[in-house]
Structure formats: C-alpha cells, structure tokens
Image (cartoon, grey):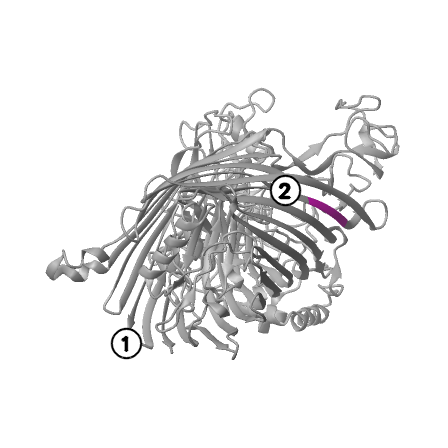
Amino acid sequence: MLTGSAIALIPGAALAQDNANDGSAIDNSEENTIVVTGIRSSLASALNEKRNADSLIEVIQAEDIGKLPDQNLAEVLENITGVQITRENGVGTGVQIRGTDSNRLEINGITTVGAGNGRGGINFEDLNPAIIAGVEVIKAPEASTIEGSVGGTINLKTIRPLDLTDTLLSVRGQLEDSSLSSGGLDPRLSAAFGKTWETSDGRRFGFVLSGSYTESTNTAFRPRLDRDNLTDCTGDTPPTSCPAGATGFLGVQFLNQVQETQNFETFNIAGSIEGEVTDRLTLFADYIYTDQTRRLAGSRVQFSNVSRLNGASDASGTGANINFTDFETFDLGTDAIGQDLGSILAVTAGTFTPYQASDFATLDDFRNAGRGAPFLRVSSDNGSRLTTSDVFRAGGNWEGERLTVAAEFSRVTADTVNPNLSSTLNFINPNSDIAPNNSAGTSFRDENGIPIIFDFRDGISFGINFADPFAPTPDQLLDGSNYVLDGTPTYSANVQENAENAFRIDASYDLAGAVGFITSFDAGYRYSKRTTLRDNRQASRSGSSSLAGSLNAGGIADLLTTIPDNFGDGTGSDLFVSGVLHLDPTNGANPEDTVAAINAAAAVQGLGPIFTSDLESIAGDFFDITEETHALYGQVNFATEDGRFRGNAGLRWVDTSISSTANVLGNGVPTLNTVNSGYDHFLPRVNLAFEATDDIVLRASFSKEINRPGFVSISSALELPDAGGVNSNAVAGNPDLRPEEVTSYDVSASWYFAPEAVISIGYFRKERDGLFGVNVDEPGGPGDPGVNAPNTRDTVGPDCEGGGIFSPLTEAGIFGNGETGVCVGLQAPFNSDGTTTQEGVEVAFQYNLSDWEDRLGSFGWLSGLGLVANYTYQTESNNSGFTDIAGSRAQAVFASLGFDPAVNPVQRETATLLNLSKHAYNLTAYYEKYGLSARVRYTWRDTFRTDDLPGTGNVFEPLGFRGAVEPRGQLNAGISYDITDQINVGVEGTNLTKSSQNISCVNDGALLCYEGITDRRIQFGVRFTL
C-alpha cells in the first residue's frame, strides 16, 4: 500500500496540495502547500497524502509539469501496489486493480466514458500523461464515492489554477524510436501555461491551459500455432506420421504469422478557470478535449488446412507428404475441478509437402481428402479507431461558518468510428496441382498447396520450404497474377456514441466541539443520465470459392505491396515468411477509392462487383440504451480529540432505470424492441484509521459495491434461428440482468519508520455475488416444464413451459410433425449462483538515503539513492459453477486421455475471473542529486487467464479453456539532467529487454499456442520551464 509520485511543480512555482480523496466536491482536509520538484519530493508528497487520508487510497504525483513517471497512463498506474496492466502491441491498454478490470476512471472526480461498449471510462491510451498532474486510486470508497467499481476508482487530477503561487510555463519535446518499426522517429510535444492574479479586494482568480500532441508507432509480432486436432495412432494401420509406440499425438492444425503496427496520433487539451467570486463563493470550470486516431497496418500469413496432412499423409500409400522429425510430451495440468489431465504427445518439428493429384487414385479422392492442402493465405488488416471525446465540468463551492456546499454539472462524450478495409489473398502456386471443386473437374478451387517447414522447439517458427520440389520461386511469390482475392473481404465503419450528463450537490456541516467526537456530517445527491448507441455498418460483398469466379490480383497490382521483411528481428529466427504480397494496409485511409478500384478490376475480368452495396447498418448489432441513476448518501465523520482515531461511516442509496432498444430478428423482418428495467441498492461504507504510535497507522474498512453489466449484455437484441435451425439456439441480450454485488473488507498496518519512508502490509477480501456468465436455457418437451425431452419439442407458442424460447418461423423438423414454430434453446447472459471470493495481501516498501549524507562522508553522493517496492498476492475461490468442455476436437483430445463427456467430463469455470495474476511485484530504484535524476523500474506479474486473442476480435478458448497468459516481466528506465534551472534533457526507455507476452493452451506452461513479441521504445527530449 504505497504511493508513487505527485502534483507537478516547477522551480519557483508552488501548488497547494489537494487532498480530496473521495468522490465528493467537498474537501474536509487541512490545506497545506507543498512544493514538488523531482522524484523524491513527489514520493514524499504522495506518501503524506496517503498517510493523512481517512480511507485507503494510493497516490502518484508528477515529478514536474507534464512528467509522470511513465509515457502511458496504464504504465503509470502499474507503479501502485495491487495494480497490474495488460498490453496491446506493448502499449498499456487495460488496468486491473486487485485482479479485476471492473473499475471506474474519473477525471477531477467526474465520470468518463470510453470508445467502446464498456463502463470503465476513457481509454487509457487516449490521454497523454503530460496533461495529468496526479493520479489517485481509491481502494476503499466513502459514501460520496460514485458506485460501480469492484477493484477501485481511478481519479486523474489536472492542475487547479488557485493552487498556483506563481506563473507557470513549461514546454517539453521528445522523439520516440520503436525497435521493430521502420517509420522513423515519432514526435511527442506538450506544454502548460497557468497564471493567477489578485483583485484589489484580495480575491484570487486563475487559469491553467495544458496540451499535448503525440505520435507513436508500436509494432508487435504474433506467431500463432493451433494444434487441437488429435491424430489417432491406435488403429490396425495407423498413419505413417505416428511415432513408434504412440497411441496418438497433436499435429499442426493452423499456422498464423501476424505482424501489427499501430500508429497513434493523439491530441489533448485541458483548461481550467477558477475564481473567488466572494469571500465565501468560489466558481470553476474545466474542459478536456481528446482526439485520437489509431490506425492499424497489419499483415497475416496463414497456412490453412494443414491438419489434413497430419493423419492422412499415407493417402497415396507412400507417406511422402509429411516428415515429422521431432516430438515432445506436454503436461496439460489440471482442470477446474482438480482432475489431472495427464500428458500428451505433440509434433514440434518437420515439413509438409502439398498433396498432388498423383497422390490419389481419382480426382474425387484428391478433391475430398486432400484439396491440395496446405494453403497459403496473406491478409491485410487495417482497422482503425477514430475517437473524439469531451469532458466538461462547471460548479462552485460555498463556505459558511459551519456549512459548506458544493455543486457541479458535468457532461462527457465519446464518439467513435471504426473504419476497416481488410482482405485476404490466396496464393496460387504455379508449381503445385489445384484440386477440383466437382467430380467432373470443370471447376477448380481458388487455392492450392505450398510446402511448409516448421520448428516449435524454441518458440513458434515456420516458413515456406524452398528445398521442396513443389515450392514456388521468390519471383512467383512477387507476381500479383499468382494471387486471387478471397471471397470475404471486409469493408465496415462501426459507430459508437457514448455520453453522460450528471449533476451533483454535496454538503458538509462542521460539528467539531458540538457532538462529542463527531467532527462533521456529509450528505449529497447525484443524478446521471448515460446513453450509449452502437450502429455497426458493413458493406455487402460477393465472393466465390472457385478459381474462375475469383478476382485475379494482377488486376489490382497497384494496390498491392510486400509484407514487412523484418519478422526475424522479433523472433530471432531465420525461419519466417517474407516476400509475399498483400493489399497495402495504407489503402484503409481511403477505403472508398480502394473499394471502387477493386470493383472496377472485377468488371474488367468479367466478374460481378466484389462489394455489392454501400455501408449498411447490421440490424442484429444495433442497440440504443439509456440508463438513469439517482443517488443519495449520508456520512458521519469522526475523530478523537488527539486525532489518533478517526474515520467515517455512511450509507449510499442508488436507484437505476434502464431503457434498452434493439432489434428482434427471426420474425420475418427486423423489429425494434424496447425493454425497460431497473433496480436499487443500499451500499454501506465504513473507514477507520488508528495511529497506534507516532509512526504506526492501522486501517480497516468495510464497503458494499455494485458492478453493473456491460451494455452489450443488457441489449434487448434477440436473434431467432432460421427455418432450418431447430438445433441452433436463439441468441439474446438480457436487459433484466442485475449488477454483481460486491462486499469488501480491508485491514492494513503502515510503519513510517523514517522521514519519507514506509513499510506496510494489508489484507483484502472481496465477496462477489452474481458474476456474469452466458447460459443456454434448453427447450423441453410439451407438457414437461423444466424437463429436456430428447425427441420432442413444444410447438405451441408463445410460451415455452419446458424452457427455451418460441421461434415462430423455425420448422420443428425431427422434434415434431411438420409444424412451423417450435421452442428452441435461448443463449443469454445470466447472473451465476454462489459467491466468488477474492482475497489477497499487499506489501509495500519505500525508503531513501537522504538522511545519510553526513554519515556517508566522502560517499555522500550516495544519499541520492532511493528504493520503492511492492508485492501483491491474490487468489480466488470461484463458486460460479462449472461447464463441460465442448467441441468435437477438444473432446477427442481429452477422450484419448481417458475422459468421457458422459462420465468424467473435463470442466472449466462457468464465469472465469479473467486477468487475475496470483503474484505480482514492482521494484523501482532511483537516484536524484546534483541535477541528475534517474529511475529504473522492473515489474513482473504471474500467469492469468484471458479470452482475448490479441490482434483479433475473437474469443480465445483453445481446447475449450481460456488462454493462459505466461508470466512476464518488463524493464523501464529513464535519466535526465538539469543543464540550467530552466532546461532539462533526458532519455527514457520502455520494455528495454523486449519482453514477450506468450499464451499457452489449457494451462500455464502446457502447450505454447501464441507468442506476443513486442518492441523496445526509446524517448529522448528536452524540457524548458520558466
């Protein structure tokens, strides 16, 4: 439980520290003025703020204007005990507090909204830390704290004008280099200006204006390996690919070489004005504008249908299509209920040779068994995110003799468009046979085989085997006429519009000396109206799986380019794919012209248009949701006369009303459906602090919270199966989904054993009821409520007494007698039963040698050294229930290990807690003296579960389990020097060791299925202050 750094100050300018650590607009703390310059002062200021707070908070304050300790807000927060982050392309994009992403992000105490469907707030990568003066993480809420977080509330603070004691001017410029990118240096610019003045009657007014412009290029290499297809070696004539004595093995299912470059362009501006209108009344207004353009330039090289060769390599009787040279046995660990899954054999090195027609007795055998696999497909990914957001706040504070009243209005918006023009080219190998589409051999596939060589013994490496006689030449790979456009290109522009208007009024009545040890009573009211609209738009397209019906890429040669050739710089291997063509990702910046050029080329080749419409709304994805809340709270603050025992106790009541509008599909035409729902909660909150000695502070807290479901989950959308879909489920949102209810307990002890030093240890426990999951309400037979009859279904609507939902246009099929209209399964979000518990221990240490300068003698220069460290241990007891592993491939693998789905099925949690690491720590060493300031920080987190496949929008569940992200550490460092009192130069480095983020299938350390290789980024620049 410790702090990091502080409100920014320059030499000669001072800020009055703001200790408003709760969500209230009232500050009951005693104001003190602290001058913050440099690492040590910022740590001391933050430590002082944490020590004096009534509730459990963590604080980071900037070392100077525009200089938080890291270049990304998520990276900044990683300095805090109990906080871990997730990264995309090496950039921090997600923050977990005490093992959960369900947290709130505020700016100056008001709610923010993000670019997507979530509730957490503005995206971390959308804000440059240069405009933020300090960061506060509230782990134990007070009654005034806005509800809606599980782990904690993050409050980003900008500079308050009336905290200035002198004119503020600061300008900073940097250049950034990315080790895996080839675009040159990226600029990072920021500036701040602030001034206060005093009227003749002694009233102060002031303003602060800060802004930043940032470009950043981040590259990641992502080789992916799927091997979830079992080759059975137990038959009388096992495939020749089986090693001696093996009963089965995992072959190669799919290979994917992904290279992504994200180009960020971010503009932020923040302005504040404050004024003492009267002796008792202060008014203020804040505005923050953010404009981020995030463009993806990516390539994917895929070897597909590889699994067709694993166990059928002897289809021609020769076994010549495969040469596996190495195998390894992998321990799969245990499942969610503790069953030992055992070990399995998997291939780790070898080659594949493409099938030829001569390998088979007939063309039909070639078409059905081999299809000419494996295939080479090269994709271009250029999805972008264009987001503008506004944060506006205006209000005032009135201070009477005993009564203090604060009121404010806020409006926040975030408007996002996600343009995407992505495509795939299939390579037609001139040196390999093409399989027919029909028995007559009059139509041929739009893809054919290419030889592969692979080696998974040290990472995931694979490429084209140019030593194979069927391999193409490098010149053939660079010839656009040897490629055809796959039939499913994507042209879309999804729209997301989020907004919230809010008003709150807070009052505090000073009771000091009037009612025993009660010091004050706080009360307040807050109203908010949150709206979110999703309108996904996509162009219809027409494609073909036949060679004659596919667009030959030679007709769009001017739109093609080679993929980057530096993949080996990240993997450290010479075995990778380069020298192949794809649609130039930069075409995504002008999609309309690119779409027109593709359609024009199709017309020249006698084909119909590839894109058959303009952008059109996808009816099943649309929703428009309005959520209104009313909240009241009351809180008693208390302290003993000597101040050793203090705290607060309060109650918050919140009422929520929801109106969800979306389309119902399956009744013939899309029909808008609006569902209204609501709920209310009482949330008690208690915080206690006891100074056992002058140096030891004990704390305890208790609180109840709610975690509202995401907007996708409460959409009123419903999609029923089509006429022949009786075996399919209807898919729906659930507007009646209730919030998760969270009960939290905290205890801690902090020993301030020296000036600017602390050792602390704390324990936390969270009991979470009603975790969100997805369930299928199975249909039952007629007259059998709750009974799942295997051979009959209820065909009399509109109610389905036995379960499921009535689908009026779906044919009953084998479950009826020719009826149209039948009960089908309903897949929808739900609140799980049982209580899931999270608990953990947080340990922190902070110390420096500043008091040792005289005692160190000639080594007095060492007094500039300091150390900050923290460690978090957390675990979960998941009682959300268990789900059998489904999927024919996964079940075949586990069946080979002795698991029968009907007797002893392999299981996982129904609602897994994602992104929770059991162990995590941070170590920061710094030196500050003689104008030199240096910092080295190493952060490490243990394995955690994920369902996110980076680089795609797909849910990642290899072999039916959530992916296991391997443990990872990262080293960041920075050094700066004051050339003069006004000029400082410095260099900073992020991910200096270029640490990878790997994902394993099933369990940590089991089957490697994904590598995330990220770049090292170096920033160097100069700062001027006046």
Of labels 1 and 2, the one closer to you:
1
Is 543 situated left or right of 52 in this image? right
Q: Which residues are magenta?
A: 655-660
Residue 979 numbered tag: 1
Q: Nearer the viewer, residue 959 or 1014?
A: 1014
Residue 232 x %, y %:
51, 30
Magenta stretch, main secondary structure class = strand
Residue 890 x %, y %:
55, 33
Q: According to the image, label 2 marks what residue? A: 368
Residue 1025 x %, y %:
38, 76
Q: Residue furthest top?
A: 903
In the image, residue 1000 above or below residue 933: above
Is 493 situated left or right of 914 in this image? right
Secondary structure at badge 2 equals helix
Residue 181 numbered tag: none
**Residue at the spot x=63%, y=42% of the render?**
368
Identified by mark 2, the residue type is Asn
**Residue at the spot x=37%, y=71% of the render?**
10
- Contact (CB < 8 A) between labels 1 and 2? no
Q: Nearer the viewer, residue 390 or 222?
A: 390
In the image, residue 164 above or below residue 256: below
The image quadrant where one finds the N terminus is top left
User: From this viewpoint, is residue 584 visible?
Assistant: no
Cα distance between the residues tagged 1 and 2: 74 Å
Secondary structure at badge 1 equals loop
Density class for disc 2 (Cα within 10 Å; few <14, some 14-19, many ≥20) is some
Q: Quadrant of residue 614?
A: bottom right
Identified by mark 1, the residue type is Ile
Is 402 situated left or right of 503 in this image? left
